[in-house]
Image: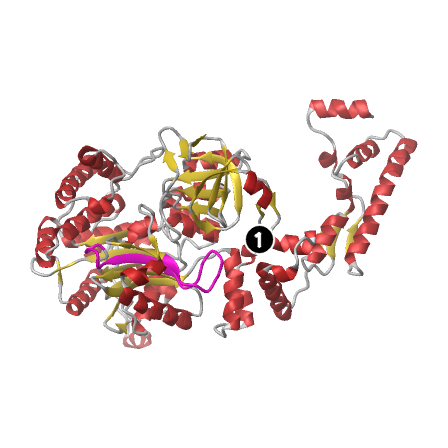
């Protein structure tokens, strides 16, 4: 991790060569280049940047500037550009020479705006330091909250706010984040618990006899003890003391966020979603607002529409007396956003206004983070929300109806691979009724998943590579679990809500997810999952329904999706399926705008019928040798290949002829006059002949 040293900011790492003298005529031709700018301020209704500057300010930064411009309540701050990240990696993790002065100038503007001073003993300013890539990468890079806290500042904050618990809670959170992100105090490979969480659980066991004692009930004395233990843990792991100087903290955090651009999970994520490694991330430094100041404060994450179904409802969660990472990390199971109307009616009313403004302005479903500090609402982030394939289609169709976007916008907005989510199987209703239901959680990623239960990402990857289907079960997921989440058929957590890391990533990847299944106990040490008197061991089968939020022991049979039931099985009336109607409408719009015809490869009557049902305009290639893979056909094909004489070959071909004739009749009927390209027999011998001795002997005996 990079830490701030004066030499890295003020001194170039390259030797300067003497600049040759120019003649007057040469000097006249030299154009003055514009001095690069690396820091952009936002606050008090003014922003140096805008929403169209994502390549420079990152998605989070650009939207903070844009929200400030349109008058939303955004805490002031500044963005360090992605160009600094590029420079950071190109120059041995050092910064451009002018960056320190630009950061100082922007910080002074923030101080003036809020009437506080960074590192001051009278009115100390605390800030957050957060990443912000051009394309959203939720949870993949690092965040530090409450920066500026130290042994002196915590006492000042406690006195100024007359709230010692808030002050010490903020300090212990800062130590935990800074120790993890900047100083590298993290769990080692194969470990299930974070070092800081282990310290917290140990203190709870000592003082209250149970490690799941709620954090919000820890006393000031408990929090002070945690601060001391956290500092000791940092010293033990790193050999260094936690830095008390706020400026050192700030530059350490900036370097750590830039450093997180190249961490393992971020690189895995970028490879999966095709995000270039050379884009870099911006860094956003923003005034802290506090959701953990007591019962009049809260923090939450909300979506302007349901990201799982696309329904036009305000969807999200919040926690009273908490900070944002508590919601996203899933360490506590939050309350549904509708409950905020009862607990904080004024804040909820303002939040509903913000929801409408954001959708009208950005013309897409938004994922926003908010904090209520002593009944005052602040918006900390907005971005286009990740959504399932079902939700993507419904939102696009609905927004056309609402005249927010055009039909062409709707077609362009939906990633092609997300349509595959609509075709994923669901649990057979009768089988689900007969299955052993062991728990219920929050429906966070629709669909049906069944596999062997595993409890860590490493095992999920190993088993998946062997061809096994697995379900990853965690108390809560963290970004380090990304590889396992990619490998798993589905994800189950016992903590966290529908806006937790597990739910957010699962929806984006089209994974089945049930989260916040609080009745389920997961024991990492014993590698067991227990609920309602049933215990599943590692490797036992488990089934999860991400549409209903249900968890079953064992395997549950699946049924085709509604679209398949309408188009292929003809077992569902199209008028009774909203999902199919929205899909059909979108496909009709696609036909209006496309200029390319679509044919598909298909080799059997069934495949051709399915292709035509889904809109293929013909068969691009029918490979006749593929007609002979099934049943007894392959034996006749092998007989033909191994024939020793013309008569033997003719007898084998006579067996194949009826199969092929019937297939072509079926194919032409299914095509209903549409064209087809047919390839004559081109058999790759290795595909038809057995490889192992047992199968070869069996074939010899048949012949």
Label 1, on which residue? Answer: 420
Q: Nearer the viewer, residue 300 or 239?
A: 300
Residue 570, percent from left and from top = 69, 54
**566 inside magenta stretch:** no
Q: Which residues are magenta?
A: 292-316
- Residue 569 is left or right of residue 367, and the answer is right
Q: Is residue 691 left or right of residue 123?
A: right
Q: Describe the element under mark 1 as helix, strand or loop.
A: helix
Question: Residue 45 in the image: x percent, y percent?
Answer: 26, 74
Q: Is residue 654 left or right of residue 431?
A: right
Predominant SS of the magenta segment? loop
Name the quadrant containing residue 292.
bottom left
Figure check: 92 above or below 540: below
**Most foreground residue, 136 or 522:** 522
Q: Is residue 159 left or right of residue 50?
A: left
Pinpoint residue 693: horizontal percent, then vertical percent.
70, 23
Q: Is residue 524 above or below residue 497?
A: above
Front residue of 202 and 416:
202
Picture residue at 46% right of the left edge, 52% below the top:
507
């Amino acid at each position: 991790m990079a830490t701030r040293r004066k030499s890295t900011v003020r001194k170039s790492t390259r030797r300067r060569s003497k600049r040759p003298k120019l003649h007057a005529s040469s000097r006249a031709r030299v154009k003055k280049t514009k001095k690069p700018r690396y820091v952009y301020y936002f606050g008090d209704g003014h922003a140096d940047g805008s929403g169209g500057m994502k390549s420079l300010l990152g998605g989070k930064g650009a939207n903070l500037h844009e929200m400030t411009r349109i008058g939303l309540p955004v805490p002031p701050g500044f963005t360090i550009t992605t160009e600094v990240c590029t420079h950071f990696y190109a120059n041995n993790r050092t910064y451009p020479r002018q960056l320190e002065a630009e950061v100082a100038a922007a910080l002074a503007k923030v101080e003036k705006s809020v009437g506080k001073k960074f590192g001051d003993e009278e009115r100390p300013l605390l800030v957050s330091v957060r990443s912000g890539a051009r394309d959203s990468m939720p949870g993949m890079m690092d965040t530090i909250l409450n920066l500026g806290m130290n042994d002196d500042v915590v006492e000042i904050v406690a006195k100024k706010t007359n709230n010692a618990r808030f002050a010490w809670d903020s300090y212990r959170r800062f130590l935990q984040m800074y120790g993890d992100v900047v100083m590298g105090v993290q769990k080692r490979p194969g470990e299930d618990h974070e070092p800081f969480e282990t310290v917290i659980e140990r203190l709870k066991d000592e003082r209250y006899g149970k490690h799941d004692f709620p954090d919000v009930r820890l006393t000031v004395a408990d929090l002070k003890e945690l601060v001391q233990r956290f500092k000791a843990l940092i010293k033990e792991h790193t050999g260094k003391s936690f830095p008390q100087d706020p400026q050192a903290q700030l530059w350490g955090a900036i370097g750590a966020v830039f450093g997180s651009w190249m961490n393992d999970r971020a690189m895995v994520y970028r490879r999966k979603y095709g995000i270039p490694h050379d884009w870099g991330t911006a860094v956003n430094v923003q005034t802290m607002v506090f959701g953990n100041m007591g019962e009049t404060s809260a923090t939450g994450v909300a979506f302007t529409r349901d990201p799982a179904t696309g329904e036009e409802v305000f969807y999200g969660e919040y926690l009273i007396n908490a900070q944002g990472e508590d919601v996203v990390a899933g360490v506590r199971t939050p309350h549904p956003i509708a409950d905020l109307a009862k607990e904080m009616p004024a804040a909820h009313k303002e939040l509903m206004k913000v929801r409408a403004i954001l959708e009208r302005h950005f013309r897409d479903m938004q994922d926003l983070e908010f904090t209520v500090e002593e009944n005052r609402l602040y918006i900390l982030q907005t971005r286009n929300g990740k959504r399932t394939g079902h939700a993507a289609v419904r939102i696009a169709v609905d927004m056309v109806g609402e005249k927010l976007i055009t039909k062409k916008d709707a077609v362009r907005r939906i990633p092609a691979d997300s349509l595959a989510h609509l075709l994923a199987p669901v649990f057979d209703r009768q089988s689900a009724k007969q299955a052993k239901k062991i728990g219920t959680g929050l429906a966070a990623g629709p669909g049906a998943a069944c596999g062997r239960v595993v409890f860590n990402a490493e095992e999920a990857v190993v088993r998946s590579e062997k061809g096994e289907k697995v379900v990853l079960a965690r108390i809560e997921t963290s970004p380090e679990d990304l590889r396992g989440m990619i490998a798993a058929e589905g994800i189950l957590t016992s903590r966290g809500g529908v806006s937790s890391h597990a739910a957010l990533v699962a929806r984006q990847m089209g994974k089945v997810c049930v989260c916040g299944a609080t009745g389920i106990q997961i024991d990492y040490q014993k590698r067991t999952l227990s609920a309602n008197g049933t215990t599943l061991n590692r490797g036992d089968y488990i089934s999860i329904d991400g549409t209903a939020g249900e968890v079953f022991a064992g395997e549950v049979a699946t049924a085709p999706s509604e679209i398949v039931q309408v188009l292929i099985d003809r077992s569902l009336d199209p008028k009774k399926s909203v999902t199919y109607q929205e899909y059909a409408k979108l496909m009709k719009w696609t036909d209006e705008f496309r200029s390319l015809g679509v044919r598909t490869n298909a080799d059997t009557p069934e495949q051709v019928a399915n292709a035509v049902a889904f809109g293929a305009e013909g068969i691009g290639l029918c490979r006749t040798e593929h007609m002979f893979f099934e049943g007894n056909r392959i034996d006749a094909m092998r007989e033909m290949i191994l024939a020793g004489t013309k008569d033997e070959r003719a007898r084998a071909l006579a067996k194949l002829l009826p199969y092929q004739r019937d297939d072509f009749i079926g194919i032409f009927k299914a095509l209903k006059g549409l064209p087809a390209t047919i390839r004559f027999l081109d058999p790759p011998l290795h595909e038809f002949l057995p490889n192992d001795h047992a199968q070869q002997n069996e074939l010899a005996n048949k012949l």
